[in-house]
Image: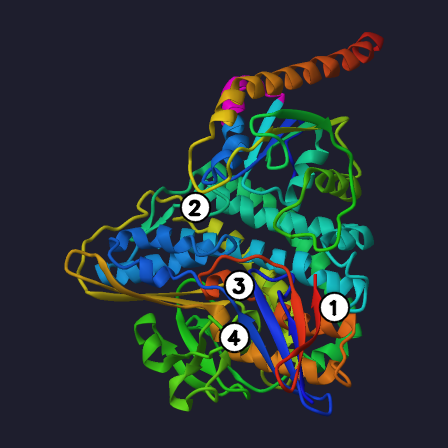
Amino acid sequence: MSQTITIDPVTRLEGHGKITIQLNGQGEVEDAHFHVTQVRGFEKFAEGRPFYEMPSLMARICGICPVSHLIASAKACEAIMSIRIPHTAAQLRRMLNLAQMVQSHALSFFYLASPDLLLGMESDPAQRHIFGVVAAKPELGRAGIALRRFGQHIIELLGKKRIHPGWVVPGGVTEPLEPAKRDEILAMIPEAYANIGLALGAYKQIAESFRAEANLFANFPSLFLGLINEDESVEFTDGALRLIDSHGAIVEDGITAARFTEIIGEAVEPYSYTKFAYYKPLGYPQGSYRVGPLARLNIAKTMGTPRADKELAEFKQLSSGPVWSSFHYHHARLIDILYGIEKIEQILTDPLILDKHVRATAGVNRLEGAGQAEAPRGTLMHNYKVDENGLITWANLVIATGQNNNAMNQGVLQAARAYVKDGKFTEGALNRVEAVIRTFDPCLSCSTHAFGQMPLVLTLLNADGEQVDQVIR
Amino acid sequence: MTQTTARCLILTCGNTLRSDDGIGPWLAEWAEEKFIHDARVRIISRQQWTPDLAEDIASSESVLFVDCSVESAPGSMGIVGVEPAAASQGLATHHVGAPELLALARDLYDSLPATAMLLTIGAGSTELGEEFSEPVLDAIPQACALLERSVVDWLREQDQRRQPAILNE
């Protein structure tokens, strides 16, 4: 008799999802799925709105990464306007996007993932949260909170709001940077370096004890997609996309937002509201790929900043080619943070950073536009069509979590096969299956453009689909 | 990031799009105007309280948490002392309560405000909307008075505690 285990909802994620694990008559794991269970429909209700409203409207999809939506959306609008934004506006947006990446990664690593890493996968779930981390390693708790504040404060200084700033608009940004704000951000940089240095040091020590998990957490070959500059350095806001295979060979390069949908398709599975992105020439699911910190570091030859480059060189020692295990998303995330701090410092020393010319204007010059950017958890693409009055007639968003969706499902299956024995799951096994998902730091609110809560349920079903066990927390 | 030390921190919480849940942010705006010339008072208004606020709390001499309460009678007022408390299982990472924030301030920064109180206003409705219910509208003058009195009393007590030290110098 087969059984199914359901984890619903999965905890310590951005949003609401569940996991089901199907067992066969021998109690072995036969299949596993990660379900995203809610839908919100932003693409639909955007229809009929003026295109210039789209950035602030689409940013409401998410409270963690609204800046990425602002930027991808504004870029799609600028494609409709057929304009190039001023240099200073591009630099200011880049800084805003990096600040968001730092705060989002700090949340993911310190608040969501570090309880597993610092306290152990088998530790008491009642203590396995940020307060447990604070009790065990207060210096890391302080570092995590400070890094999150660092990113949030920059967002607030630039956009006047910590969440959903309205500063990014089609054509650039609404206001230039004031010297006092530049100086305030620069003054925060040394402490940010100290905090990320502490975190990287601690992580490298901890990672040694998670070799088994590193082998079993979504560790398989796949394609990787991410933004990159012409000099092959990491990019979050401009540049073009590169797709590499599991051995590092370039499959596609120089993919602009306008070309994105030529090569990337989206499949639908009946068990999830999140779509499954794939590389069209290989079809679905063979063309599935991964995005986000791991993909970015696998693709880039350099970070483009000295401190992060040193860390990248060490990271690349993990494998002779692209790093396959999604466990290493955690490490890549910390290197992203270091890069973000360095890049923000570089941007602030740009001699034109205080320039007053930060916005270009135009009306509708094309009836379709697409924009792409790197959100903290991976590539984000917005594509709009408008009528001659600039009203939206069609919108499509391809979200990082959808692009990682197949890998997350494969990862859940891999971990479930390793940790669910004889049709039973222990607390540690349950947590490890969830922890695979956490490595990707999915944003389920973004991926379905849905509201989210964050609890977890795991259900065990027999071969006839009847529930035989369930854990809710 | 170094925080500005506040003699009195007013920390409000609520969503202005959920009717009476917006009373915290409303009182924050009122307090901003009331204490605009008093550098001893700092006001932070958030939709949710998050762990990063622990540093602001740790660097304050007194803190007044302000929130609506769905457990109290609509429009009723309550003000109680708050003690640090450990977090429970299933703690959300996006929202923590006043006792947990105090515990974080203590555990992370080894500092606690001398006084910590929670002012609650009973909610009549938390449905979507930007208007307050009648009971909460009626309670606003009393809530403002209670908030102001608390802050003024605390500042006076702090001044009195400082006085002997100044005299002894």
Residue occupied by mark 2: A165
Q: Are marks 3 and 4 in contact (CB under 8 Å)?
A: no
* Three-letter residue code for mark 2: Pro
Residue occupied by mark 1: A204
Residue occupied by mark 3: A443
Q: Where is residue A201? Give x, y as percent.
A: 74, 63
* Three-letter residue code for mark 4: Asn
Q: Earlier in the sequence, mark 2 or mark 1?
A: 2
> Which numbered dot is residue A404?
4
Left or right: A109, with A280 as reference point: right
Residue in view at x 75 percent, y 65 percent: A117
Compared to B73, does B139 lie above or below?
above
Residue in view at x 57 percent, y 53 percent: A103
User: How far apart are labels 1 and 3 at the CA level?
Assistant: 26 Å
Residue in view at x 14 percent, y 60 percent: A388
Do the residues at discs 4 and 1 belong to one chain? yes
Identify the chain of the residue marked 1, using the numbered disc in the image: A
Do the residues at discs 1 and 3 belong to one chain? yes
Foreground tag (2 vs 1):
2
Q: Where is residue A216? Give x, y as percent.
A: 69, 82
Do the residues at discs 2 and 1 belong to one chain? yes
